[in-house]
Image (spheres, coloured by chain):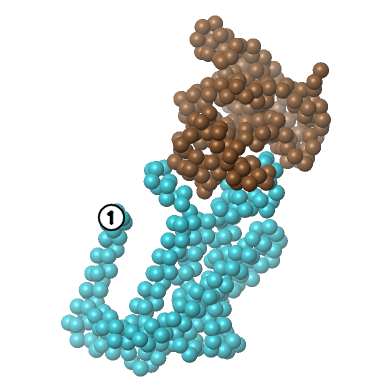
Amino acid sequence: MTPPRLELTGIAAGYADLPVLQDISLTIGPGEFVSILGPSGAGKSTLFRLLTGALKPARGEILFDGRPLDTGSSPFAFMPQRDALMPWRRIIDNTTLGLEVQGISRHQARKRVEPLFDEFGLSGFERHYPSALSGGMRQRAALLRTVVQNRPMLLLDEPFGALDALTRAGMHRWLENMWMRHQWTAMLVTHDVREAVHLSDRIYVLSPRPAAIIEVVDIPLPRPRVRTGVAGAEAARIETAILDTLLSPYEGQSS
Amino acid sequence: MLMQFYRGLPALIAITLLLLGWEAYARLSGISPTVLPAPYRVIEQAWIYRQPLWENTLPTIRATVFGFACSLTVAFLLSVLVDFFNPLRQALFPIFIISQTLPLVAIAPLVVLWFGFGLAPKILLVALVTFFPMLVALTQGYQSTEEEFEQLLASMGAPKWKRFLLARLPSALPYFFAGLRISITYAVVGAIFAEYAGAAKGLGIYILNAKNNFRPDLVLAAVLVSAVLTLILFGLTLLIQRLAMPWTRSALGSGR
């Protein structure tokens, strides 16, 4: 049996006297879309810092394709919370940023991203500056910048948090389609239950800090996911169940 | 284009009114032109003395440009060094701040005493007054870099110098140009002041001589020239900024 793409076992981590992650174990197989769902401040960004090597775990083990993470080259392509498009670079030059960092010439890098602009709904905007684009387009450009790096796995850090609800719903459908076509291995961190249910094969639900995994939810619904009929009702049921787990045991503490 | 003209209109009206008021006062009050010459007379004399004025403007331009170029180069190199080695910043910044507290009136004659009447003391003084604002502007500019750009670049595996080139340096551009606009006006004043303290030729020494000859009209004519010179340099920095930061233009166009 091939090892899972990413496997975390019994991870604990934190800073000085602040334990952030208590006991995190999770696995992500090749081509799987997995979400980490938790309240804000639950240590989602600490998880990313562990994966990118900026922080060492106090306990536990991180394996990628069966081997410990090596500090030299990261297997992850990272998409930050806000799009982080550089205002002084044209869209095409923003999308080639990762390739440029890898030392690929500007000309070569452009040739590699250019064919993808159509699929990402950005054709005609190659030469525009980010400020001329709508929020949804900017986010698609940010995703394009992430996937052209050709890393084995995508890390998406609340990528749609800054978008309005309608644009966000559109982005969910679009991203699901893209994922079905490309079979990326992806880990999404979010606090949007609907987003997690729409996109994921499996959801890990985190408790508030110090975070542990309080529930693992498999979502066996057919793709592309819809909000109608039996599947839609099932999705709604899962959403409610997750919301209940997230809210009920802590309602008393939050006030 | 028309928009910009309309935006400049109030300033134009204010300046015209000011000049008209001055002209009226100078003519109607019977004040001697050796005390307060009318604007018309200043311009008339400036035209008559255009040859010596121009000959004295050239050295001032030279001192300003050379001095400013020196200070810009050193400020940039130091800003990069300081950005990479923080202890250096802690060691040097107090010295720079003290250098800004020195009164120019005291320093200028000393510098002339040490370096003579040539170009060197002017360059030095211009550099002294412009160096610090440029350095501060650049350092602040680097620090204004958005955290996310650096995180993103780090996740792509960019080493520190690449993060500097791709994120910190471009982030500093608006600050750099703000500093440039302030410093360029200091630079002209600094050059004239250095000449005032001792020079063979230059607007500063021209002003000094005109004053000693009881020619306030020629003093003001030289002032007019220096003002025009400063405005031209100021305009040049705006032009360079537009060329160097094309994305700010397109942002305006798209209304975001």
Q: Residues within 10 Å of mark 1 (few under 14, many from 20)?
A: few
Of residues A248 and B151, the one drawn nearer to the viewer in this rendering? B151
Q: Residue at x 68, y 22 (%)?
A: A31
Q: Residue at label 1? A: B2
Of residues A83 and A130, the one drawn nearer to the viewer in this rendering? A130
Instruction: Kindly indicate the quadrant of the structure image that contains residue B37.
Output: bottom left
Percent across and percent down for residue A149 are 65, 36
Instruction: Please state which amino acid type lies under the numbered disc 1.
Output: Leu
Q: Colour of chain B?
A: cyan
Q: Residue at x 48, y 54 (%)?
A: B245
Percent across and percent down for residue B88 are 69, 63
Q: Colour of chain A?
A: brown
Percent across and percent down for residue B94 are 64, 68
In this rendering, the count of numbered labels is 1
Percent across and percent down for residue B75 are 59, 67
Of residues A101 and B148, the one drawn nearer to the viewer in this rendering? A101
Residue extending farthest bottom: B213
Where does the C terminus of chain A fall, quadrant-wise?
Answer: top right
Of residues A40 and A2, the one drawn nearer to the viewer in this rendering? A2
Q: Residue at x 46, y 25 (%)?
A: A166
> Which chain is home to disc 1?
B
Q: Is residue A56 left or right of residue B20?
A: right
Measured along the vertical axis of the image, is residue B19 above or below residue A221? Answer: below
Q: Of helix, strand and loop, which one carries label 1?
A: helix
Q: Residue at x 29, y 58 (%)?
A: B5
Q: Is residue A187 left or right of residue B24?
A: right
Instruction: Kindly indicate the quadrant of the structure image that contains residue B153.
Output: top right
Measured along the vertical axis of the image, is residue A44 above or below residue B32? Answer: above
Where does the N terminus of chain A fall, quadrant-wise?
Answer: top right
Residue B9 seen in this snapshot: yes
Residue extending farthest left: B28
